[in-house]
Image (tube, rainbow, N blue to C red):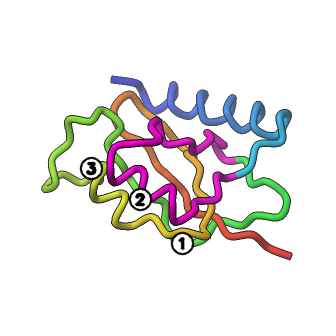
Amino acid sequence: MMSPETIDMLQRSAAKEAAEKGRIPYLVRRRDVAAWETGRGFPIPFPMLGDYIPPGWTPDGDALFVDTSGFGSPGEPALTLPQLLEKIEPGVGYAFTQQGQFQAYIQPFRRVS
């Protein structure tokens, strides 16, 4: 299990790298969701942005707390993959903003003019 300090350090490091490399949220398409529901297209291609907010994007709503181990159950606080896929919307960008050993936060983003 990672300490909160380690997760914080990793988040800051990810933000710096995302800014340097110009990373942006992955814009989900309808066909992405269909592929993920049938088990294709993995791993999910969301970048890790940490607390970096790319120009032209804004966080939209609450981050999704998800299980990344593959061993989570539907009754637990972290969303399982099938539960996550029910929440993902085509036309919305998504990126990891915080990641621990077994769970992560995925933030929805919208493009801004």
Note whether 71 is above or below 96 in the view shown: above
Q: Nearer the viewer, residue 28 or 61?
A: 28
**Start-end of magenta stretch:** 25-51
User: Number of labelled discs?
Assistant: 3
Please state which amino acid type lies under the numbered disc 1. Gly
**What residue is shown at x 83% (from left), y 64% (from top)?**
56
The residue under label 2 is: 34
The answer to whether 34 appears left or right of 15 in the picture is left
The mark lying in front, picked from 1 and 3, is 3
Considering only order in the chain, which callout, 1 or 2, is on the residue closer to the N terminus?
2
Residue 100 pos. (x, y %): 42, 33
Q: Is residue 99 magenta?
A: no
Note whether 17 is above or below 86 in the view shown: above
Q: Is residue 32 magenta?
A: yes
The mark lying in front, picked from 2 and 1, is 2
Do the numbered discs 2 and 3 sit on residues whose CB atoms are within 8 Å?
A: no
The residue under label 1 is: 61
Quarter of the figure that contains the C terminus: bottom right
Q: Which mark, residue 83?
A: none
The answer to whether 105 appears left or right of 108 in the picture is left
**What residue is shown at x 57% (from left), y 62% (from top)?**
29
